[in-house]
């Protein structure tokens, strides 16, 4: 009798149904249940994890945040204007 984990591994490795029946002693129903379970898991993940939210935004007062304001067509906030000016001054000093 195969465990769900064994079947999950086999699916992840692209094993065929026949292979799982033969080598794991899995039943077609077990495999079917596992496939459904994985599908559901993936569907839930898709709507919960949005790639954009995984990367933390740079806080205001950095040149990245300044450019974000500009990209959005916003007037940069004071913090970002100062932060960007400081970053540019630093860069100019380094270049000189
Ligand atoms: Zn800002």
Image (cartoon, helix red, strand yellow):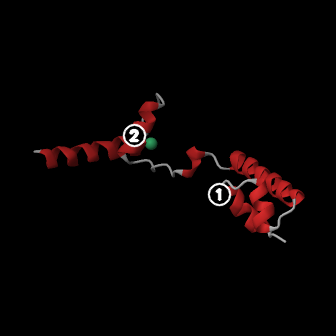
Picture coordinates of residue 48, whole percent (x, y): 70, 49
- Quarter holding the N terminus? bottom right
* Residue 75 visible at all: no
- Quarter holding the C terminus? top left
Q: Are marks 2 and 1 in contact (CB under 8 Å)?
A: no
Q: Residue at x 39, y 40 (%)?
A: 66
Please, which residue is most extreme toward the left here? 96
Q: Nearer the viewer, residue 66 or 37?
A: 37
Question: Quarter for ligand 1?
Answer: top left
Q: Secondary structure at mark 2?
A: helix
Q: Residue at x 77, y 67 (%)?
A: 24
Mark 2 highlights which residue?
66
The label number, if any, that marks residue 13 in the structure image: 1
Upstream in sequence: badge 2 or badge 1: 1
Picture coordinates of residue 15, whole percent (x, y): 70, 56
Give residue 18's quadrant in the image.
bottom right
Above or below, comparing residue 13 to residue 43 in the picture: below
Picture coordinates of residue 6, whole percent (x, y): 74, 67
Left or right placement of residue 37 versus residue 45 in this view: right
Left or right placement of residue 15 versus residue 36 in this view: left
Mark 1 CB within 8 Å of ligand 1: no
* Residue 81 visible at all: yes
Mark 2 CB within 8 Å of ligand 1: yes
Query: Rounded to the nearest whole Å, what is the CA distance between mark 2 and mark 1?
Result: 45 Å
Q: Residue at x 39, y 48 (%)?
A: 61
Closest to the camera, between mark 2 and mark 1, is 1
Q: Nearer the viewer, residue 38 or 6?
A: 6
Dot 2: few (<14), some (14–19), or many (≥20) neighbours within 10 Å?
many
Q: Nearer the viewer, residue 75 or 95?
A: 95
Dot 1: few (<14), some (14–19), or many (≥20) neighbours within 10 Å?
few
Q: Residue at x 28, y 47 (%)?
A: 87
């Amino acid at each position: 009798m195969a465990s769900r984990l064994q079947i999950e591994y086999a699916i992840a490795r692209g094993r065929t149904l026949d292979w799982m029946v033969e080598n794991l002693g899995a039943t077609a129903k077990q495999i079917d249940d596992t496939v459904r379970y994985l599908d559901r898991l993936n569907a839930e993940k898709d709507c919960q994890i949005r790639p954009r939210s995984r990367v933390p935004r740079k806080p205001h007062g950095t040149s990245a945040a300044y450019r974000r304001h500009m990209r959005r067509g916003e007037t940069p906030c004071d913090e970002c204007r100062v932060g960007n000016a400081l970053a540019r001054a630093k860069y100019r000093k380094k270049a000189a």
